[in-house]
Image (cartoon, rainbow, N blue to C red):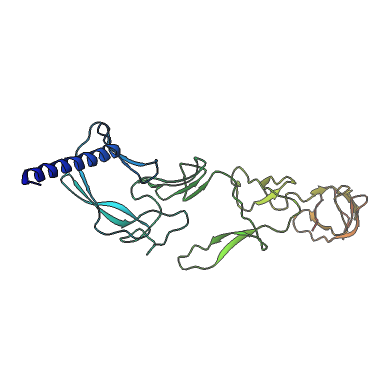
Amino acid sequence: MTRSTLTTTCFLMTYFLMAIVGLQVGYGQSQTTGTLHLRNAQAQSISLTAPEQGVTPYTLRLPAEPAVGGQSLTVSAVTGSIAELTWADSPYWSLQGSSITAGGTGADEQFLGTANAQDLVLAANSAEVMRVVGVAGPTQGYIGFGTSTPQAPYDFTNTVQLSSRGPASEIRFAEPAAAGTEFTAIRAGEQTSSITYTLPASVPSQNGYVLSTTPTGELSWVRPFNESPMGVFTPTPNTWQHTITVGVGVLTSASVPVVTLMTSPGSTIGVTVTGIDAASGTLQVETSVPLTASDRLAWAIFNP
């Protein structure tokens, strides 16, 4: 084989190899859509594509070392049109729980929430359930349950239930002292049916009033002993034995009657309850002297 023949043969082989390589690349890369198809022996492929228009040329420079589990590709620096990619720990919370180094909002600490002045919203089935206000203002940090505009540090728009697993749950009100450890608690007792109390619509008109309830749980402000039967009896003049009618169903064997005399100043007259007749609803009362037409007997019944 002459030198000329050898040169011609090498040129043809090179051209043939280039044609083969070009043919294979043609199968793997679209010349019109800018898409790179990657595949093995199977027919299916994974593709990388560029936008059809408005492209600014740039280069992605891959990391020099492999990643470790849980890391993701992150752009660490951009120089001109070259973006440097590095492997970094992924700053996300896993649905199986995340391992963190330190909880908090300071440097090198991790937290679940927003890092700017925006609310944190939790939803279920695309419906908002809870909101933590992040927008700067007087309500920042407030938490709303069922409301997107909480008006208190904890704002509930629906029923709140404290469930029990044995001992009754309770609501505790801490004493107003920075270092205090004591509290006042409210808890439910054992019940055979549910009870709902409805508070009064306004404050009492003066001091000394107490809360009273109806059988349906409607609370109201009343004077102490306001519900106790009481009255003023006009005796028959010149008699010292008196029968006071208080009403059938008022007196029981445990009733405590209180009777006092309303008379002119300077008089000292004894008053004694001598009998209680629950069936007829009457009191038998005696005075140490006969009473006059202007005297009166005031009475009240207390049923423990």
Could you say which is closer to the camera, residue 87 or residue 285?
87
x then y, percent, for residue 290: 89, 55
Q: Position of residue 233 (x, y in %)?
A: 83, 48
Percent position (x, y) of residue 145?
51, 46
Residue 100 lies left or right of residue 266; in this view the side is left
Position of 268 relative to 223 (above/below)? below
Q: Is residue 248 above or below residue 272?
A: above
State which quadrant residue 5 falls in: top left
Quarter placement of the C terminus: bottom right
Q: Observer-nearest residue: 232 or 174?
A: 174
| Residue in front for this viewpoint, 70 or 159 | 70
Q: Position of residue 112 (x, y in %)?
A: 41, 54
Q: Residue furthest front?
A: 1
Q: Residue at x 16, y 43 (%)?
A: 14
Q: What residue is drawn where x is 60% and y is 49%?
A: 206
Q: Nearer the viewer, residue 114 or 280?
A: 114
Which image quarter: residue 71?
A: bottom left
Q: How many marks?
A: 0
